[in-house]
Image (cartoon, rainbow, N blue to C red):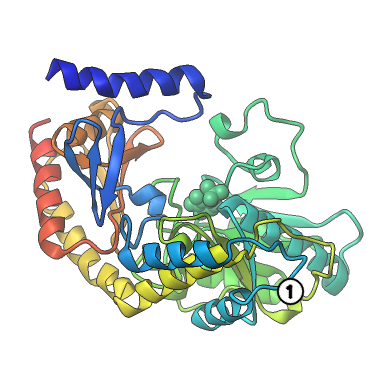
Amino acid sequence: MPETRADASQWIALEDHWSAHNYHPLDVVIARGEGIWVWDVEGKKYLDFLAAYSALNQGYGHPRIVEALTRQAKELALTSRAFRNDRFGPFCRKLSQLLGYDKTLMMNTGAEAVETAVKACRRWGYRSKGVPAGEAEIIVFDGNFHGRTTTIISFSTDEGARGDFGPYTPGFRVAPYGDVEATRAMVNDRTVAILVEPIQGEGGVVIPPADFLPGLRALCDERKVLLICDEIQSGLGRAGSLLAHTLSGIRADGVTIGKALSGGLYPVSAFLADDAVMDVFDPGSHGSTYGGNPLACAVAEAAMDVLVEEGLVEHSARLGVHLEERLRAIEVDFIEEIRVAGLWAGIQFSPSVGGARKISEALQAKGLLCKETHVHTLRLAPPLVIKQEELDMALDIIEGVLLSL
Ligand SMILES: *Cc1c(COP(=O)(O)O)cnc(C)c1O
């Protein structure tokens, strides 16, 4: 199909010429999406196994969420928080009750939710813990991904994300992920919070040892430190639980969520915590023009209703067991590790493969879209609305590609 192929390359050329090269996308130009499927500009159909980094847990164009968006867009889309709107209070109640926290503070992107958590913890540290002004410390972990703002990349350990963007925001210390004792050694009287991903998503679906999160919880309780879980990718069903950290039998003092909160339609994020933390915010101390706008509230409310009423969280846990069984049954000697939590898998290949990019391109050719993370890991994260027979279809493709390598 030389002619239609030329079409796709036109879009690729435009993007490369007219936009910054801050991503390395697969060369597929998508024009339409529905459920777990997408179609490119040449009409070729693919199964999506990335789900926009888990923003599309409810699938492309979920009718109920699209309906909520269009209806609300016609009614009222934005007021700013200078005025009140009739969607904001009811939605904050719903989300707070769903996730079990006193209060919700709404923002737009994941990075903003993390920034909100950082500000809340610092202020709490000065006002409630008595940390001397300007000396608060937050412990984070190597391999972390919390977003792209200047403060957040200041504590990234990924040189590509961080290099030459300094000077960096001080006040963060990096502990080894999964190691409670090493973390304990870094806690001091100035430590206000530990910020952790219950499972590292961008890191490659890295699941910490079972005693890690309970160990951090105990440490935080002993030393009067806030435990903040970044659930932006791991939460809202992806790992087989509404919040992944609760699988360890603990409760964080605050959580950040985003991505699937939007049902894949419109950026919405939030920081949730109890009053003792949230009360540090007073008028003028934080905000965002679009944060908590009625359109976002309507979309997020429908997205949460779909998640709960369609049983997507339980579905993810149940199908995840099947996903893991089938992945482990693939007999090739170049897989170093398979990590699965719910409908979320990281397959780590040995360097002999020459990088997981090769595999994502081979899968693309067979009609399955997913993406390598770092060099040697492939991440699988289909929309949670996937049916078992569709999952099996995808696994047949994955198995076929791996066996033919
Ligand atoms: C994606 C992600 C973020 C950042 O979210 P954006 O909406 O891209 O700003 C933060 N934390 C985690 C764990 C993420 O996966």
Q: Where is residue 244 in the image (x, y as percent from the top left)?
A: 44, 68
Q: In which quarter of the image is the N terminus?
A: top left
Front one among 367 and 226 = 367
Q: Does the residue labelled 1 lie within 8 Å of ligand 1?
A: no
Q: Quadrant of residue 400?
A: top left
- Of 380 and 64, nearer the camera is 64
* Image quadrant containing the C terminus: top left
Residue at 44% from the left image edge and 45% from the top image edge: 203
Q: Which residue is rendered at x = 46% and y = 75% of the image? A: 246
- Horizontal and vertical percent position of residue 57: 35, 60
Q: Residue furthest front?
A: 74
Residue 123 appears in the figure: yes
Q: Which residue shows up at 25% across the image and 28% down it?
A: 358
The residue that appears at 23% across and 33% down in the rendered structure is 359
Image location (x, y in percent) of residue 96? 57, 79
Q: Work out whether 38 lies above or below 374.
A: below
Q: Residue 170 sits in which quadrant? A: top right
Q: Residues within 10 Å of mark 1 (few under 14, many from 20)?
A: many
User: In the rendered view, does 197 fall on the left or right side of 336?
Assistant: right
Q: 22 above or below 237?
A: above
Q: Is residue 331 visible?
A: no
Residue closer to the observer: 83 or 334: 83
Image side of residue 174 versus residue 346, left or right: right
Q: Provide residue 230's location: percent of width, then percent of height.
A: 55, 60
Q: What residue type is labelled 1?
A: Val
How many marks overall? 1
The answer to whether residue 250 is left or right of residue 105 is left
Question: Which residue is label 1 attached to?
Answer: 277
Classify residue 397 by image quadrant: top left
Which element is circle 1 on? helix
